[in-house]
Amino acid sequence: MIKECLCESMQEITELRSNGQNTQAKWKQSQSRHQRKCHQNNRRRKKIGKQIDKRSQKRHVDPEQKDLLQQCTNRKQKESREEFLVLKSSLNKIENEKLEKAKESAQA
């Protein structure tokens, strides 16, 4: 700014500004960068806040709802165990039949 005041012609001022001597332009650039960074930080904070809210909602479930969920999972576990036992028994039957057929073919 002081150098601009010392210049006598407009050409000298434009040369100074083109060489990066204009402090006002630099200030505006740094100010706009600062605003962008603040805006980005605010977005990040909001996003993190939403994630925390979702986590807290999962943790703070009503006791009645917790009981229902627990009963549901227990029921599903029992059903899956029963299904597994049925499949296992059917596989055992198939294996036994194959063994008997193999014994009969070996005896013949």
Image (tube, rainbow, N blue to C red):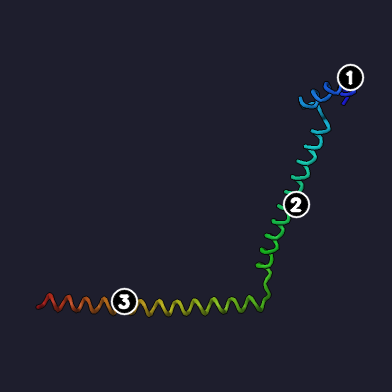
Give the number of the disc on residue 91: 3
Residue 17 image point, x, y percent: 80, 27
Instruction: Please state which amino acid type lies under the numbered disc 2.
Output: Asn
First-in-chain label (3 vs 2):
2
Mark 1 neighbour density, 10 Å: few (under 14) some (14–19) many (20 or more): few
| Residue 1 versus residue 43 in the image, above or below | above
- Residue shown at 35%/76% (left/top)? 88
In the foreground, 17 or 42: 17
Callout 2 crowding tier (Cα within 10 Å): few <14, some 14–19, many ≥20: few
Q: In which quarter of the image is the C terminus?
A: bottom left
Which residue lies most toward the left here?
A: 108
Answer above or below: position of 38 versus 23: below
Q: How far apart, in angstroms, are the residues tagged by discs 3 and 1?
A: 101 Å
Q: Residues under labels 3 and 2: Cα distance? A: 60 Å
Q: Mark 2 points at which residue?
A: 42
User: Tag 1's secondary structure?
Assistant: loop
Q: Which quadrant of the view contains residue 19?
A: top right
Q: Where is residue 89 in the image (x, y as percent from the top left)?
A: 34, 79
Q: What amino acid is labelled 1 in the image?
A: Glu
Q: Which comes sooner in the sequence, label 2 or label 1?
A: 1
The residue type indicated by label 3 comes to: Leu
Q: Residue at x 69, y 65 (%)?
A: 56
Residue 74: percent from left, percent from top: 53, 77
Q: Please, what secondary structure does the residue beneath circle 2 have?
A: helix
Q: Is residue 107 left or right of residue 49?
A: left
Give the residue number, with chain letter if any, for mark 1.
Answer: 8
Residue at disc 3, secondary structure: helix
Q: Which residue is drawn at 82% across and 30% down?
A: 23
Whole-angstrom CA distance, mark 2 to mark 1, is: 47 Å
